[in-house]
Image (spheres, rainbow, N blue to C red):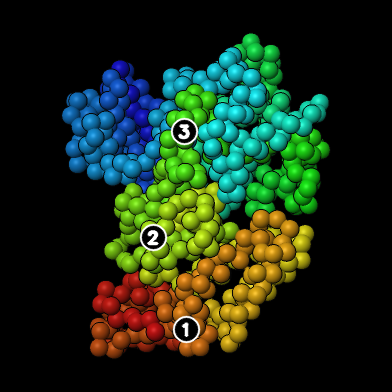
Amino acid sequence: MKKIIIGLGSCGIAAGGLKVKEALQNLAAEADSGIQVSETGCMGMCYAEPMVEILEDGHRTIYGGVDEKRAKEIFQNHALGGKPVADAVALDSDGGGSEQGFLAQQERIVLERCGAIDPESIDDALAMDAYAGLEKALKTMTAEQVVDEVLRAGVKGRGGAGFPTGQKWKFAAGYAAESKYIICNADEGDPGAFMDRSILEGDPHSVIEGMIIGGYAIGAAHGYIYARAEYPIAIRRLKIAIEAAEARGFLGKNILGSGFDFKLVIKEGAGAFVCGEETALIESIEGNRGMPRIRPPFPAERGLFDKPSNINNVETLANIGWILRKGADAFSAYGTEESNGTKVFALAGKVTRGGLVEIPIGMTISEVVNEIGGGTKDNKALKAVQMGGPSGGCIPANMMDTVIDYAPLAATGAIMGSGGMIVMDEDNCMVDIARYFLQFTQSESCGKCTFCKIGTKRMLETLERITQGKGEEGDVEKLETLSHQIKTNALCGLGQTAPNPVLTTIRYFRNEYDAHIRDKKCPTKQCKALISFNIVSDKCVGCTVCAKKCPVDAVSGKAKEVHAIDQGKCTKCGICKSMCKFDAVDIS
């Protein structure tokens, strides 16, 4: 039987996927074809959504950028007529399609089932070996053997710190207690990051399986998934998956007849970035304000409800079932000598093919941005790639051959982080980028320690002055001094890494800071306080479009006469420039 599958992750829904699904359901009903219309999560090609797949006898043909009109064409020609719409094919099982380059260098472990199953169907997941790793662990391995297998695989925590997961499990397993907890950190808060959300929306069973295995390994009978409430689709699919797993005997009492019990609960967070820090997350689950604890003791000894606890992020846990199913050697075959496996990145910003990518650790930034991502949009020069979210740094274009691994990235001043990768082109002002990220971390500071609360405030004030043309000699040195003081003395990882975007932009783009401070100019013409919009007299034909479109009536002039902009009224919104067909509006 033919099957039509629509991508309905958040990206697919935002692009209009629900209307496409409704149109295809109506067409299938009208044709009385018996063709089943179902849905899946994001397969990573967010830039090509909405996506529609025709599945028949194991052969997949995937179409990108499908609207309701194109959906009708695909249904009539391909679903009914058996003839693919060639100019719209993005991927097919035979290696054809316009978007093969996006997947060619990827290796899918975490994303193995994302975009290939209905995330609300446990039967789909089981058909692709979901819970096979759990079954192997419970029926053929002791808890100690499971820990050893994860240790041997060499999987490091994918939440940013890169601490060996097996070692973390070993610590928690080593403490005796009447109850223990395993926690999934799904409090994804980095601007531009959507790895956790996409995994939970596309394959919630991979995370659930990883948590059950982890619970067995450390001796925990209780688990919490801490997910931010801004992820309603992910939370809904998690709830469906948990209920289905309970009904099939993968959760609850005496799992698979092993005598092991495990209960899983979802805790919705209120969106505080600091709750991504594991001890602040624990405080939030307990019903307290999310503020980091002083360590030691570490959570492995005294964590949730003062009991031994283990916390891993979504991607880390999504690796576990695969590792137990295929073995540590299969996992360690990917990656580098220092770091095994793959890493998922949210490729965003000014890149042609933005989306979710999973690569073997050891590829270069250039390979991801230029070969998988298709380079920058609009043929503009690549300027930098920001990695690691607000805690990361900006790596300049001349360092794009940097290997994606923990140590090489740290040497640049950036970090691996949870997997954000934001591409910037020649139009980005790096001083303003530093201001943006520091504004985020400063507003998200919990306020517990002075260096983070006050130090980032003083840094932000300095950056705001610089971008407003009020910078002074010595400001850059002041930023560097404050940065090092905060990194050395802040209580948690949020404060310790908050200065990274500032330090890396000073390190690699000092000339832009000097231009803002000494020349009172923004080289990229992005800082509004340092630019003005003017009409070029010999280009203006007096069409009046700019005057009509200006929201504050700052443009004046009669038809067929040269217009002028009142600098006192102008808010520098840029509408006049974007609307002018004669390139008569100049920014200086």
Q: Position of residue 273 (x, y in %)?
A: 64, 53
| Gap in angstroms between the C-alphas marked 2 and 3 | 26 Å
Question: In terms of secondary structure, where does tag 3 sit?
Answer: helix
Q: Position of residue 459 (x, y in %)?
A: 64, 73
Q: Secondary structure at mark 2?
A: loop
* Total number of numbered discs in the rendering: 3
Looking at the image, which residue is at 55% across and 32% down? 152
The residue carrying pointer 1 sits among few (fewer than 14), some (14 to 19) or many (20 or more) residues within 10 Å by Cα, namely some
Nearer-the-camera pick, 306 or 229: 306
Please identify the residue farthest to the top as the structure is shown: 257
The alpha-carbon separation of the residues under discs 2 and 1 comes to 25 Å
* Residue 491 visible in image: yes
Residue 400, disc: 2
Which amino acid lies under the numbered mark 1 shown in the image of this protein?
A: Ala
Tell me, for residue 515, which label it has, or none: 1
The kind of residue tagged 2 is Met
Query: Where residue 331 is drawn, which disc sits there?
Result: 3
- N-terminal of the pair, mark 2 or mark 1, is 2
578 vs 192, nearest the viewer:
192
Identify the residue shown where x is 77% and y is 38%.
301
Query: Hey, which quadrant is residue 534 in on the image?
Result: bottom left
Instruction: Bin the neighbour count of mark 2 within 10 Å (Cα to Cα): few under 14, some 14-19, many 20 and up.
Output: many
Q: In the rendered image, which quarter contains the C terminus?
A: bottom left
